Amino acid sequence: MYIDWAALSQALDCESSGGTRYARQALSRILGDEAIKEAVDYYISGQSGSELARSVLWHIHPQSGMDYCYQIFKEETDIERRRFAVELLRNLADENALKWVPEFLNDPDEGIQAWGAGLVDQLIWSDFIDAEDCQGILDSMKSHENAQVKERFEFIAEFLADRKDNSEQGSGGQQATRPEST
């Protein structure tokens, strides 16, 4: 298979740039939307090799995979497929998926609510978003009636507090201090 890297970089508008984001976009284009959708369906089916499909999707965070997971959530009548789609989306998601979280938290299914809360956790942990980007969602998680969603909020709050404490400490995890003068 020949890849026209010059054309691909032009299509991605990154002719003189590189980096993880562009690499993910390039890999998504190389695989193609149909292969990505097939990988989503394969993971949801739970067949042998489904974890490999999930791992590949996780590495590239394909927009088409995110969109397809969301489509399954919206259109599927089988609750298990809907749950697995949101669970997989938690792994594929980048900042673009944050807009769907209120729907997940308001879904009547507690499993979908919990996976939606897990998506927020994953986005923050992976540095796709900051807490400020989702403060309203965090507030709704804090007072949510689903105990799993509340627990996920508490986990996120503890993680954010630890991250803040660590960033306020100097390098090497120790408080930066000035040497005393003699």
Image (spheres, grey):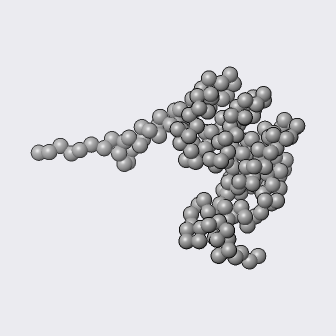
| Residue drawn where x is 78% and y is 59% of the image | 33
At horizontal 60% and vertical 26% (from top left) the residue drawn is 142
Residue extending furthest toward the right: 77
Spot occupied by residue 81 in the image (x, y as percentages of width and height): 83, 41
Q: Position of residue 147 (x, y in %)?
A: 67, 24
Q: Taking the image as drawn, is residue 6 in sight?
A: yes
Q: Quadrant of the C terminus?
A: top left
Quarter occupied by the N terminus: bottom right
Left-right relation of 16 to 53: left
How many dots with numbers? 0
In the figure, 2 relative to 42: above or below? below
Residue 103 vs residue 166, the one in the foreground: 103
Residue 28 occupies quadrant: bottom right
- Of residue 52 and residue 73, the one placed in the foreground of this image is 73
Left or right of 16, for residue 4 = right
| For residue 173, side relative to residue 58 (left or right) | left
Residue found at x 37% / y 48%: 171
Residue at image location 67% in from the left, 28% down from the top: 148
- Residue 92, given in percent of the width and then of the height, sits at 69, 49
- Name which quarter of the figure residue 149 lies in: top right
Please indicate whether residue 114 sits to the left or right of residue 167 in the image: right
Judged from this view, the residue extending furthest toward the left is 182
Quarter residue 101 falls in: top right
Instruction: Note whether residue 114 is visible.
Output: no
Q: Is residue 142 above or below residue 93?
A: above
In this orientation, which residue lies closer to the viewer: 14 or 90?
14
